[in-house]
Image (cartoon, rainbow, N blue to C red):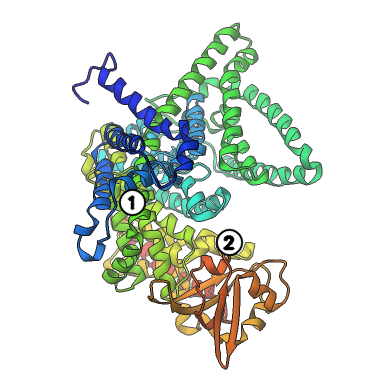
Amino acid sequence: MKTSARDRIPLIDWVLALLGSFSAAYIYIFYTQLAGRSGAPTTPDIVIAVCGMLLLLEATRRALGPPLMVVAAVFLTYTFAGPHMPDVIAHKGASLNKAMSHLWLTTEGVFGVALGVSTSFVFLFVLFGAMLERAGAGAYFIKVAFSLLGHMRGGPAKAAVVASGLSGLVSGSSIANVVTTGTFTIPLMKRVGFPGTKAGAVEVAASTNGQLTPPIMGAAAFLMVEYVGISYVEVIKAALLPALISYVALIYIVHLEACKAGMQGLPRRHNPTLLQSMLSFTGTILGLCIISAAVYYGIGWTKDVFGAAATPIVAVALLLAYVALVRISSKFRHHAEMDPDLNEIPEPGPTVKSGLHFLLPIVVLVWCLTVERFSPGLSAFWATVFMIFILLTQKPLMAIFAKEDTLVESFKEGVTDLLEALVSGARNMIGIGVATAAAGTVVGVVTLTGIGLVMTDFVEFISGGNIILMLLFTAIISLVLGMGLPTTANYIVVSTLMAPVIVTLGAAHGLIIPLIAVHLFVFYFGILADDTPPVGLAAFAAAAIAKSDPIRTGIQGFTYDIRTAILPFMFVFNTQLLMIGIDSWWHLFLTVISATIAMLLFSAATQGWWFTRNKWWETIALLVLVFSFFRPGFWWDMIYPAKLEVPATQISEVVEQLPIGTPIELRVEGENLEGKFISKTVRLPFEEEASGGEERISSMGLMLSQAENKVTVDMVEFGSPAESAGIDFDWEIKHIIQPADRPMKEWVFVPALLLVVLLGLNQRRRALKGAISG
């Protein structure tokens, strides 16, 4: 409270803290008794549950402000007021005993998946990021970005984008990213000509995108592992390409802003010749490629040859590499120091060498996730253990290599850094823990009242079954809730309500949308809320540093982030952007290049400037080209049908010919248990060991019967793919859907590229003409 004493903890806070601790510990202390009387709570159980819920609401208000508390309270009210609600969302209501038991004493509410994930491994990732930041990695990333990009047009802004992206590798928080990098980058952007509003907006756009950057994304990304039922590596794989092209586009937006205003970069200490610049650039790219190849293929080779012994061998190699890199860093210690009054670009070589050992913990994390296939929690644990080792040893080792007689003092500084990092990690986790617990209340209400099923009918009614309108509706909900809710809570609430609805209605209209695509859609728009006025917290933080108006900063930041807003719509319809359905390196190359070109053209369209100021028809032409690169299938489907319908009677022959790992796509219809007629498209995988057609059908969980030209489902096996897809007995399989044999849809890129060249030449001619006349 604002009136509370700042020099001591008030007595009432001690009382509330003890009550809250006991309410949470009650489930652990009396676990056996609660398990024995599940569904039949006693009076003490209900009293504790009510106290716990009220204290959780108060903790939410104190830690995160009123908005999330109000959302949780509204859902709690809905639980009891169901019979008095409008018919479209009415339900029979729940008693106090039933509601409190469900929300507090089971794993369906507060102590559900969200809070479980946040305590299991989100905390470890937050702690890992706090330690990396305390060790000096954040300052290192910022200075490296400036040394490489600061001399370019609008260089400080480009460096801010790259620095925020690198910081996003380890922070997973847009506000922390703004405060960390913005303190240094925003004043430098203003110095080269960016207005305060735009300088703050660039930092906001870069920092909000930091939560999209693997391997450490926002806390909500870890929840996807549980909600979608895939590994964290798969989440990273799906999120990688959109994150990269989003950052490339933001750098290009900054470049366009600099071109429009005629800005220059910061001066270099030494101006290299063209040959030196080319050699330096080539050497840097080759070095990165060699290091990446050595890590990827070297690690894979080690695992294949040494088997179980690979881990200790890599651990020893990692230790030796750490000592060697710290020795190198010790020679360039002064290059790692941050200078807020930077007047010239630091030399790239020494700056990069001043902190190469900070990359090793990320190597450990990636090794554990991708090679050892550890869980995210265990991977973060080993990365954090290595960070503890770095915090305790980097300063003593540097003192030894620098031949300074400060070994004991350096070790004491390392211990202090470790303790402060632990405190910082714990503080950063408070908001996430409270947010996931409060959002768990919403999840519990959804499962208790069945509003999720009601939402399907409601959304289908207001959207008319149109997928685009449905996605727009979901995006608006995410943005509105995101104005007051943290990203994690926003993701939990919206994904719980809307993700099943989109998947269900998409299937009903013949569009199979992967669940990961829908969850990433919600995740993206939840993150965008951090710069959405009137309550964009990241925008407020950046505006305070830039000394600009927070609302204008947020609006400007959102205009830069429109490129991020268009991506979710595209990867829902073109899942190749999530690396789903890519079958070769050539296919991957085409996908990356086309998506990058599309995003750059979209940036030029939204900024109203490419080589020169756009004419209105050029902006429209650019947007049409963007659509063509992002979704070439839209135009190709008009010429060549994408799918063929095969009679259901041929299902045995079709499934027998399918390659291993390729699911079969079916159109099915029938009545569900509520007597509602359902017609939808499903995709069913079969077991790799199954050989014949009948055996593969059985492995899907289906037992079929055929009468004349009609194929009916006689039985659905419990827990099978068919049951997960929502198929019920006595349903009819209408037909099989197979991809049509047609030319690659990527042929659309050929005329699109020709139009891009013509448009570019026209703008280039106008720009040169304007320069001559000027």
The reply, left or right, for residue 74 in relation to residue 437 is: left
Label 2, residues with CA under 10 Å away: few <14, some 14-19, many ≥20? few
Q: Which image quadrant: the N terminus?
A: top left
Is residue 392 visible in the rendered image? The answer is yes
Label 1, residues with CA under 10 Å away: few <14, some 14-19, many ≥20? many
- Describe the element under mark 1 as helix, strand or loop: helix
The reply, left or right, for residue 245 in relation to residue 188 is: right
| Sequence order check, earlier mark of 2 and 1 | 1
**Image location (x, y in percent) of residue 579:** 55, 60
Residue furthest to the top: 405
In the image, 624 versus 697, the foreground residue is 697
**Mark closer to the observer (2, 1):** 1
**Image location (x, y in percent) of residue 553:** 25, 43
Residue furthest to the bottom: 708
What residue sits right under mark 2 in the picture? 589
Q: Residue at x 42, y 74 (%)?
A: 508
Q: Residue at x 35, y 57 (%)?
A: 497
What residue sits right under mark 1 in the picture? 445
Q: Residue at x 46, y 61 (%)?
A: 597
The reply, left or right, for residue 359 in relation to residue 174 is: right
Would you place residue 522 above or below residue 673 in this image?
above
Residue type marked 2: Phe
In the image, 288 versus 148, the foreground residue is 288
Is residue 269 visible in the rendered image? The answer is no
**Image location (x, y in percent) of residue 254:** 37, 47
Circle number at residue 585: none
